[in-house]
Amino acid sequence: MLITDYFKKFLHSSQSSGIILILCVAISLLIANSSLGASFQNLLDTKIGTEIFHLNYPLSIWINDGLMAIFFLLVGLEIKREIVEGELSSFKSASLPIIAAVGGMAVPAGIFYLFNQGTDYVKGWAIPMATDIAFSLAIISMLGKRVPLSLKIFLAALAIVDDLGAIVVIAIFYTEQLHWDYLGLSALMVVILIALNFFKFTKHIFYIIPGIFLWYFMHHSGIHATIAGVLLAFTIPTNVSTTEISPLEKLEQKLHLPVNFLIMPVFALANTNITFKDGMVDGLFTNFGYGIILGLFWGKVLGITTFSWLFIKLKISSLPDRSSWTQMIGAGLLAGIGFTMSIFIALLSFKGHPEIQDEAKFAVLVASVISGFAGYSLLKFVGKKKAGNLEM
């Protein structure tokens, strides 16, 4: 099995930053539920930028739409490299995370709908669809060698497809208005980036500048701007040479440290500031709470493993190298960490209803914690068992 050195470095740095990420979650929750909570929220709501180019946004928007676009750029680079020369280079292996992501979106949405059909809550059907790529990758990376690299690549690819699916759902069902002029300009930027690749431009600056414009136009189009990072990543030139370092590989090296030790911790601090209120726990034991929690915790793993099993049995796809079905279940559980994108969809679904938004955010947090703990524990147990068998 061919796993690139760059992906190994990415996972190694993700493993190191995973502990920092979890600490930032704890710190953010503590701040949100202390006397500093209001001040911290005011900081996140502080507008930064200029009105001249319509770029005067709260700090939280700059973090979630701006900094996270850089995170998606790095993950997109890693996925492209594996498609070109690594674990995802064959159709059987590359097709699995795509079909698994489809199952991981359809089944949770169906579970939520069954619990909430005929009520006003049904418009939140997309809340349990999304996988939080930052947290899921951080947790699986913390397992180190207990988990095969191919499974980590599978989860990364699945989460990318999953988040892209969530962005499409937001654009179609939750965006009040799409601005087609900005979408057209975004498409133009993509064409320019593809042309630069075709004519073999290698300096990063030729891609970064159109990439910034792509982000700007995508953000103003009404579609979540983080997709710009993925689109940019897939236009950066690479090669299959083991001696010549490609522009893609050079950019990966530059992004590893700032992404894993600055962007992800800041992201965690900004998005975990959930203030606990009276009645939140009771909200978990309603059809609304059941739809979110069971959708993320049970629906994700059920959809991912069922769709994967079906396509593997049909010999369309194949299991990640050296992985077992138990480990696939563990990866499916980690995909139940919905968090940021799920919370984002909840905010869009129930605009003007802060009490419902708070219930949804708390249910997403609970489901994500349960899914993360269950997935980590299962993968750790299987990893220890396999190590024990090898020693025997």
Image: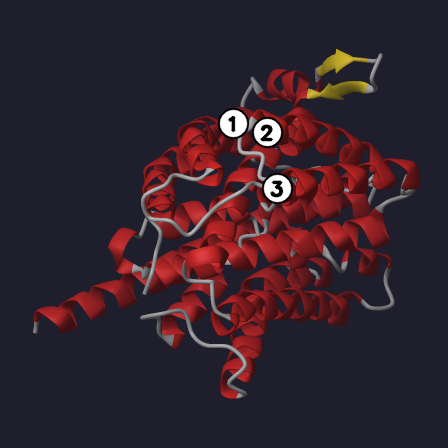
Q: Is residue 169 above or below residue 219?
A: below
* Horizontal side, residue 245 vs residue 213: left or right: left
Q: Nearer the viewer, residue 182 or 220?
A: 182
Q: Residues within 10 Å of mark 3 (few under 14, many from 20)?
A: some
Foreground pick, 157 / 172: 157
Which residue is labeled 3 in the image? 197
> What residue appears at the point 47 percent right and 33 percent down from the top-left corner?
251
Residue for badge 1: 266
Amino acid residing under circle 3: Asn
Q: Tell me the quarter of the image containing the C terminus.
A: bottom left
Q: Viewed as shown, does residue 378 lie left or right of 105?
A: left
**Residue 335 — which label?**
none
Return the residue found at the far bottom. 314
Quadrant that contains the N terminus:
bottom left
Give the class, few, some or many, for how many residues have Cα within 10 Å of label 1's Cα (few <14, many ≥20): many
Q: Is residue 334 visible?
A: no
